[in-house]
Image: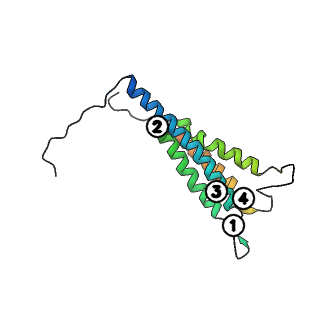
Amino acid sequence: MSTAPQETVPPPSGPSRRLLDLALRIAGGLVAVLAGTLTAVLELLLATLRVGGHLIGVSVLVAIAANIALSWFAHEAVGRRWAVVLPATPWFVLMSVAAVRTAEGDLLVTGDNWVGLAMIVAGAMTFAVMGFRQILAPPPVRSGD
């Protein structure tokens, strides 16, 4: 235990602090977008994972866990309630592209792949619930402002 008194020095305020805060929020938003893209690709790769010839639903669990974590991170990093949109947008775009047949006939998520369909529904519902929770959350209490 320290015997020195606790010093509470307020952080310096001014334009440099605001500029640093803005830069960190933008960087956090970019990380959230990139992470949303990467987790969508990972989930699409895991949607066809089989054990003993049978599809396993690991991508559904990954979609739920990753989308909760991404929603939380985006809100904390950006500091705005709408930040859940940042990881959700690339995730939805990739899931939509994966469900459309290309000119060559390729299709990533087929109608007979129950895991892929469950992953899309579970992931979309997770983002929806996390966004809804942010909308209903009481405004944060700011101390010292």
Residue at (54, 38) in percent of width and height: 29
Q: Is 99 left or right of 71, judged from the image as shown?
A: right
Dot 3 lies on which element? helix
Dot 4 lies on which element? helix
Q: Is 36 left or right of 114, judged from the image as shown?
A: left
**How far apart are labels 3 and 2 at the CA level?**
34 Å
Residue at (58, 48) in percent of width and height: 35
Identify the disc placed on residue 116: 4
Q: Which badge, 2 or 1, is on the more N-terminal residue?
A: 1
Q: Nearer the viewer, mark 2 or mark 1?
A: 1
Percent coordinates x, y for residue 19 in the rendering: 43, 27
Q: Which amino acid is tagged 4?
A: Gly
Q: Which amino acid is tagged 3?
A: Leu
Q: Which badge, 2 or 4, is on the more N-terminal residue?
A: 4
* Observer able to see residue 9: yes
Which quadrant would residue 116 be assigned to in this image? Answer: bottom right
